[in-house]
């Protein structure tokens, strides 16, 4: 359910690679959080305090000023992901009056997200059994499913049918993530991803 997160509107902070700390400037907790989320492209193992400090050009003392430990940083990064990849996306889609167009935009932009954002999404999904990840991932999944159920309900489907269709739509998205992660040669170019996204949208967005 990610998209071009760097283009989200205020008050959501832009999502971009971390910049090295400037001399004599203390990093904020938000900067550490953003750096940790970016590092999650490598999985949870990529979130290492020493490595992040080197990348940011600061000492570990800056980290401990804001966070008690690595677990607190990971939790903050996951909550940041939840805000960017779910809350902000839903808020933006809710501005579209037609539920069919909302669903079409959701499906296509999710699959066509920038590689870094998809990598983070895949890494978090792969770490779903982790004690830090599980509660936030579960909350995100429930909210995403609930949003799509609501779209189908607006289209006139019963709750049971809307639930089934929403599960199918979310499964298609998760399946696409699996393919992109494990068999990238199946969708090697942006054009192939776009064609797949159009096919998925045509299959899952009912006509009026």
Image (tube, rainbow, N blue to C red):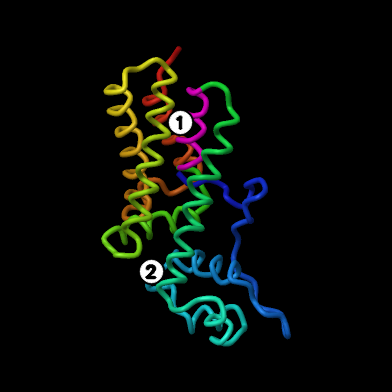
Residue ranking furthest to the top? 208
Which circle's residue, 2 or 1, is located before the other in the chain? 2
Instruction: Determine if the magenta segment contains residue 84.
Output: no
Instruction: Determine if the magenta segment contains residue 103.
Output: yes
Residue at point 48% right, 64% down? Answer: 76
Horizontally, residue 5 falls left or right of residue 136, namely: right
Q: Nearer the viewer, residue 161 or 196?
A: 161
Residue at point 63% right, 56% down? Answer: 13
**Residue range highlighted in magenta:** 99-110
Residue at point 29% right, 22% down? Answer: 161
Dot 2 falls on a residue whose secondary structure is helix
Residue 83 tag number: none
Characterize the local packing of mark 1: few (<14), some (14-19) or many (20 or more) Cα atoms within 10 angstroms. Answer: some
Horizontally, residue 91 falls left or right of residue 144, namely: right
Is 141 rendered above or below residue 33? above
Horizontally, residue 59 falls left or right of residue 77, namely: right
Quarter of the rendering containing residue 125? bottom left
Horizontally, residue 158 falls left or right of residue 118, namely: left
Dot 1 falls on a residue whose secondary structure is helix
Q: Are marks 2 and 1 in contact (CB under 8 Å)?
A: no
Residue 139: percent from the left, percent from the top? 37, 49
Residue 165: percent from the left, percent from the top? 31, 27
Residue bearing mark 1: 198
Residue bearing mark 2: 44
Is 42 rendered above or below residue 136? below
Closer to the eye: label 2 or 1: 2
Residue 177: percent from the left, percent from the top? 37, 48
Quarter of the rendering containing residue 44? bottom left
Q: Nearer the viewer, residue 187 or 6?
A: 6
Residue 71: percent from the left, percent from the top? 40, 73
Is 48 rendered above or below residue 113? below
């Amino acid at each position: 359910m990610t998209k071009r997160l760097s283009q989200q509107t205020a008050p959501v902070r832009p999502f971009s690679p971390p910049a090295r700390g400037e001399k004599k400037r203390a990093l904020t907790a938000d900067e550490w959080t953003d750096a940790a989320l970016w590092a999650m492209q490598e999985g949870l193992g990529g979130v290492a305090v020493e490595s992040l400090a080197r990348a940011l050009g600061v000492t570990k003392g800056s980290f401990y000023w804001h966070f008690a430990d690595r677990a607190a940083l990971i939790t903050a990064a996951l909550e940041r992901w939840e805000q960017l990849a779910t809350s902000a996306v839903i808020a933006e889609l809710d501005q579209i009056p037609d539920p069919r167009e909302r669903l079409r935009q959701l499906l296509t932009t999710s699959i066509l997200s920038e590689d870094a954002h998809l990598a983070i999404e895949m890494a978090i999904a792969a770490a779903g059994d982790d004690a830090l990840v599980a509660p936030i991932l579960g909350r995100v999944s429930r909210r995403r499913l609930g949003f799509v159920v609501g779209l189908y309900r607006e289209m006139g489907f019963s709750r049971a049918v809307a639930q089934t269709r929403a599960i199918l739509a979310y499964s298609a998205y998760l399946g696409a993530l699996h393919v992109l992660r494990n068999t990238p040669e199946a969708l090697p170019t942006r054009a192939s991803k776009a064609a797949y996204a159009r096919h998925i949208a045509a299959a899952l967005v009912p006509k009026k």
